[in-house]
Amino acid sequence: MRTTRRALAAVVSVAALLLTSACGTGEDDSTAAKVEVFTWWAEGGEKAGLDALVNRFTTACPGQEFTSGAVPGGAGINAKQVLNARLAQNDPPDVFQVHAGAELLDHIDSGQIKDLTAEFSSWGLTGTLPEGLIETITVNGKLWSVPIGVHRANVVWTNDQVLAESGILTAPRTMKDFIANLTRLRRDGVESPLALGRDWTQLMLLEAVLISELGPKRFTGLFTGTTKWDGKAVRSAIEDYATILGFSNADRDSLDWPEAERLLIDGKAGYQLMGDWAAADLEANNFSGYDSFTFPGNGKAFQWLADSFALTTGAANAAGGTCWLQTVASPEGQQAFNAQKGSIPARTDAPTTGFSDYQLEAAEDWKSGVAVPSCAHGSACSQPWQNAANAALGAYSASGDPAALQSALAAAAKQFVRQG
Ligand code: GAL
């Protein structure tokens, strides 16, 4: 990926004016059947994407009314807990947001979501989703959730002015360069050159460092059981991670990603590692003084994650939920959502009208890069594994004990890895 600037501001602000609430797009029709769609998209670029999809749904599904079950918190950190409690109490939403991949496994095992294999072919998804993505969401020979968009996780966002004031005008290519730049920024008075948030954002950072240290294949092997978590390579990645963490804000454990992003916008930090949903959010915050680059040393690795929607087996309005999924599956729904959300459509035939230069480049990189999955965003690991990894990172942030971090990560892998 080249260093690029986004040009989403106009699109995002028009959408914000037109669509003031997630469920405010339809007529208030008291006879309409309500469809509860459960997500963690409640503000900024995330809500703009959801609103655009709701708008399509309202047109495509007459007689159905969207109701939002949004529980805010980046990467679904709060939403997943609420969802799991509701599912356990037999109080499911009709449809819920879930990452495509291993994150689905526990829902499938527990019989909480419907098999959508037949719908995939009638909605034209089988021939239009990339094969690798279909493979990832196929479990027991069946398809379980409808992917809407693909995000890239291993991207660093910058505040160009902060960097320029320290004479940093180009993107660092290696970890060594990156650490040198962080050192330089601190020397010049930027106390916390790297904006960072709580546990799952720290897991993202560690994953990016691991990709640099191990390369895409061995990194992926960490989640399939072919690469050792307790070996030398992971130890050395943890050492680099520790160094980089030392340049982050001390209050990281209490911040969600938009709050960490605020440090970047306000010029208190020069860099933030965050998935490419950050661009739509920076634009929604009227900040255009940024650039982006792939995490140093990651080469052509495209660390992907896909947002998708699943239909619950206990859905009160299964017809409405199915119509939501059909909207998600349609090329028009994918275009409308992704133009606002900053991801690229899961369908390869969806129009790219209204997409930024960044998104068009990301679409090219998705085709030509090396796909690696993400544990922080559920394409690589199951929910219990993700929870254990988040907890290990949170504990490390407080204790600074590298051996404890490595053994906690190794124990989680041992407990949760599923081969084959
Ligand atoms: C990811 C999700 C993205 C974005 C992000 C931050 O897990 O897939 O769409 O919402 O979390 O909340």
Image: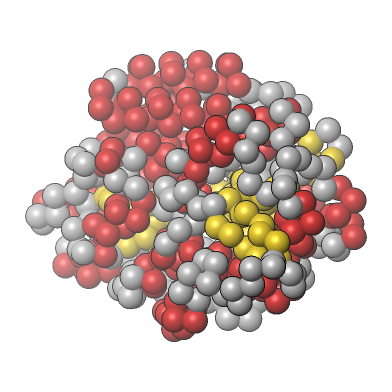
Estimate the x, y position of residue 173 in percent, counting from the top left.
Answer: 40, 54
- Quadrant the C terminus occupies: top right
Tell me the colour scheme of the image: secondary structure
Q: Is residue 313 above or below residue 54?
A: above
Give the left or right position of residue 172, taking residue 350 as reference: left
Estimate the x, y position of residue 374 in percent, counting from the top left.
Answer: 56, 42
Give the left or right position of residue 119, taking residue 221 as reference: right
Q: Is residue 92 visible?
A: yes
Residue visible at 59% across and 73% down? Answer: 28
Residue visible at 20% across and 63% down? Answer: 267
Estimate the x, y position of residue 338 in percent, counting from the top left.
Answer: 59, 68
Q: What is the quadrant of residue 49 in the picture?
A: bottom right
Q: Is residue 344 visible?
A: no
The front one of 219 and 255 is: 255
Give the left or right position of residue 227, taking residue 269 as reference: right
Q: Is residue 402 above or below residue 365?
A: above
Estimate the x, y position of residue 387 in percent, counting from the top left.
Answer: 49, 29
Residue visible at 28% across and 38% down? Answer: 253
